[in-house]
Amino acid sequence: MNISERLFETAIQDLNSVEILYNSKQYNIALFQLQQSVEKFVKSFGIKTEIIKPKDIATKISHLPHKVFTRLYQSQIEELSKYKGTPLLIPDMVPPHQRGKSKVKENLKGIKKLRSEILSNAELNKNNLVEIDDLKKFFKSAEELENEPTFKDDKLFADIKEDFVKTNEHFIEYFKGDENIKSISEDLIKNSDEITKNKVENHKQNRIRQRKFGYISYVWINLSLITSPHEQPTRYPSNKNDDIPNSLYNENHILIKHIPEFIEMMRKTITRYNEVYGK
């Protein structure tokens, strides 16, 4: 068992202990264990996907697991920024129906915005303040992401087939005189129904996988931001006043009230994570 797998298993143990501690009214330690669980899950994911290295756990990430995701998005930003579009010498090789349809700029803009929002919210959450309206939005958005995407199979099949056939027709015309390419493209067009069926299935599976990862990342990012500021005050008395952890984190604390929901969401992420990445 490698370090990523060991972190993941330990995170599950931490999550199981949250429920026990919560039911025993050890609220401050329950919240601490929730923070630890989220942190270990995210670090496990970071190592598994090579976003971070094991040596980064203590130094560069520490108790701020949201940094794993800002690193992930920064890597994606750098990769998308390299894209310069179609090489100038062969713009006509791209089929006419596909020209100008690249979503690279749109995706780049979206990832930059997401990374910026994570960093901004991390700064705001330093004061340990979470508004009830923010939690409601969090729960509502997570619930929406639970639903698998729906597909209009007939339209999806027609669109993918049309794109596939037009692409091969264009190659026949573009490479006019090349009998080998003509033969290959004509054969592909002839078998386009069967090929399209496979493309449709792959498209649907990819979309479902993306939605599952969307749920995982949404829950883990937000719970990282919500719980990280409580890593210390759940365990140590305040040096500014007379507060001690078990009086500060009582049944009226906004996060303590919602620990059962957090546990349920985290368990759903475990299921989806195993479906996306394998047990």
Image (cartoon, rainbow, N blue to C red):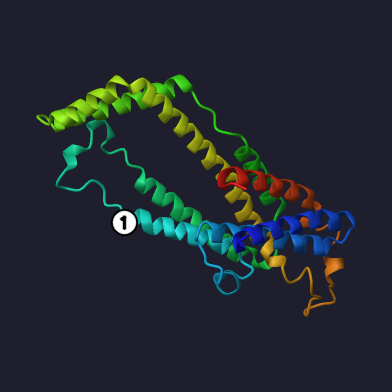
- The answer to whether one can see residue 6 in this image is yes
Tell me the residue at 18%/42% (across/down): 91
**Is residue 44 placed above or below 208 in the rendered structure?**
below
Residue 96, compared with residue 31, is above or below; it is above
**Residue 163, image x, y percentages:** 31, 28
Q: Is residue 22 left or right of residue 130?
A: right
How many numbered marks are there? 1
Q: Secondary structure at mark 1?
A: loop
- Left or right, 249 with reference to 46: right
Residue 260, horizontal then vertical, whole percent: 79, 49
Q: Quadrant of residue 93?
A: top left
Q: Nearer the viewer, residue 54 or 153?
A: 54
Residue 205 in the figure: left or right of residue 279: left
Residue 69 spot, x, y in % from top left: 53, 58
Q: Which of the 4 image quadrants contains residue 211?
A: top right
Q: Residues within 10 Å of mark 1 (few under 14, many from 20)?
A: few
Q: Residue furthest left?
A: 177
Q: Position of residue 143 (x, y in %)?
A: 66, 40
Amino acid type at circle 1 is: Lys
Q: Residue furthest right?
A: 24
Q: Is any atom of residue 130 visible in this view?
A: no
Residue sitting at the far bottom: 239
Tell me which corner region of the image, top left, top right, bottom left or bottom right, holds residue 94. top left
Q: Nearer the viewer, residue 124 or 237?
A: 237
Residue 96 in the image: above or below residue 253? above
Q: Residue at x 85, y 58 (%)?
A: 21
Q: Quadrant of the N terminus?
A: bottom right
Residue that appears at 49% across and 62% down: 71
The one nearer the camera, 176 or 269, is 176
Q: Which residue is mark 1?
A: 82
